[in-house]
Image: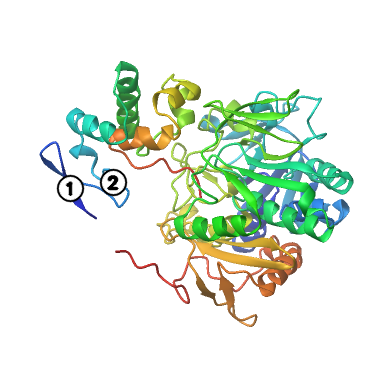
Amino acid sequence: MPVIEIAGKPINVNEEGFLTKYDEWDEEIAKVLAAQIEIEMTEAHWNIIKFLRADFKTQGETATARRVQSVGGVPVKEQFVLFPKKPAKKMAYIAGLPKPKGCV
Amino acid sequence: MKRLVVLGGGTAGTMVVNKLRKKLKDEEWSITVIDKDNDHIYQPGLLLLPFGVYRPEELVKKRAHFFPRGVKFIQSAIDKIVPESNHVLLAGGQIIEYDQLVIATGTSPRPDQTPGMDDPAIWRKSVFDFFTLEGSTALRDALTAWSGGRLVIHITEMPIKCPVAPLEFAFLADAFFEERKMRDDVEIIYVTPLEGAFTKPTASKRLGTMLEDRNIKLEPDFMVDHIDPEAKTLVSMDEREVPFDLLVTIPLNMGDDLIARSGMGNDLNYVPVDKETFLSKSYSNVFVLGDASDIPASKAGSVAHFAIELFTENFVDYVEGRTMKHRFDGHANCFIESGHGKGLLIDFNYTTEPLTGKFPIPVIGPLPLLKESRLNHMGKLAFRWIYWNMLIKGRRIPIPALMSMAGKHQVTTK
């Protein structure tokens, strides 16, 4: 697995660029990751990212779009507005979490 | 006398009572299985029924016929499980107590969860599901009578029962219309919430090419918001629109509502378990088998089969206070029909994606993996006999429960 430098820090990522170590994430890194996928972070964006971080800590896995709606309180439709085209994947990327296991 | 109660007499429930009745002494354990009806449906057949391969009556047998002697069958709807007091409450108010509970209540299509989908103006008239006997039969009639137009094949949200089934449906529809000399009158569009044709990279690429070869258009990253019944259009969360003349949809799949009534499920009514042993994360005398659990594996009979092979031995150890020895790896093994009498075979688990190569089966010989062949199609047809006569009766099938790398070509990473 590659180690890259983000915001001046060495960070472990997988082949798709998702962070692999929960504790290496911070808000500075999130801003860089967001910029890479052309997302401008607003308060609404941060709310979701913070929910995902906290939820991962208790659940041990990345919340799905459905869970961000039912537990996090942000309708899926709004997630699509905030993180266009692929909200689940983009939210996880910025939050420094694994892609949600959609499916197998 | 200890009491084992199994909820659900489908593929997983039937297999597990057959296996456990042999392992548990009659004088030590009673086994009771509860299901709301007495019809066991051969679900893999529901994919082929719309194309005239099977008749509906060929796919249904009485559940009771498959329970061994020494297993009590109660036919009743279930109100809820009360895990704190170790009992199940039946719809009629009767209380069934247990020492160990196995939940095998499966997953079902829920068209009511997408606005517009089950609108009476379109439901089973121009919008069809095929994982119910009624839906599959109605779709057969519609396909036979259809004169052509836009056929849209659609997945609402993952996870779904048998994740390859909608792709198979697309391949079979292409072949069906070609054989009827009307393929030029049919436009086929495959609409999925995934990024590509399938979930895993190697298979997704191979299956994506197969869609292209058949002139089936892929509409990826499509999360449906609602269906407009008047305009006959799928509308996505980001306001893309896909019009259809005939829609074959996989509605949202959810675990049984009884799981929600019992307060034991996640958002989709699946019960959280340890993915290697199927033991409930909340109750130490509750296991969940088959599609009803939240394990990150395919919701498919093959997964239930491999899982139960390991579970049976684990259960005997567990109830006698020993450590469970086996750890499930998420092994799945699926035939994928590709049309014109051919099929593919895929074999994978939690960590290894489906790869190309050969799959060794004693006697029958090596089957090609992730590659079309007539042999794989024959395998799929032969499976109906194996299912009724061996699989659900708990007889051993010579395929190992844990995945093996034998014969597989590994993908080299740069």
Mark 1 and mark 2 lie on one chain; the one further toward the N terminus is: 1
Q: Picture quarter containing residue B389?
A: bottom right
Q: Marks 2 and 1: in contact by CB < 8 Å?
A: yes
- Which residue has dot 1 on it? A4
Return the chain for callout 1. A
The answer to which of B29 and B183 lies nearer the viewer is B183
Q: Residues within 10 Å of mark 2 (few under 14, many from 20)?
A: some
Which residue appears at 78% of the width and 31% of the height?
B123
Instruction: Tell me residue B218's x, y (percent).
Output: 58, 46
Instruction: Tell me residue B406's x, y (percent).
Output: 46, 76
* Residue B100 at least partly seen: no
Q: Residue furthest top?
A: A43
Residue B413, above or below B301: below
Which residue appears at 54% of the width and 43% of the height?
B293
Callout 1, which amino acid?
Ile
Q: Are marks 1 and 2 on the same chain?
A: yes
Return the chain for callout 2. A
How far apart, in angstroms, are the residues tagged by discs 1 and 2?
9 Å
Q: Residue furthest front?
A: B184
The answer to which of B19 and B31 lies nearer the viewer is B19
Which residue appears at 30% of the width and 44% of the height?
A18
The answer to which of B17 and A44 lies nearer the viewer is A44
Instruction: Tell me residue B98's x, y (percent).
Output: 60, 40
Q: Residues within 10 Å of mark 1 (few under 14, many from 20)?
A: few
- Horizontal arrangement in the rendering, residue B221 relative to residue B22 (left or right): left
Callout 2, which amino acid?
Gly
- Which residue has dot 2 on it? A17
- Horizontal arrangement in the rendering, residue B249 relative to residue B280 (left or right): right
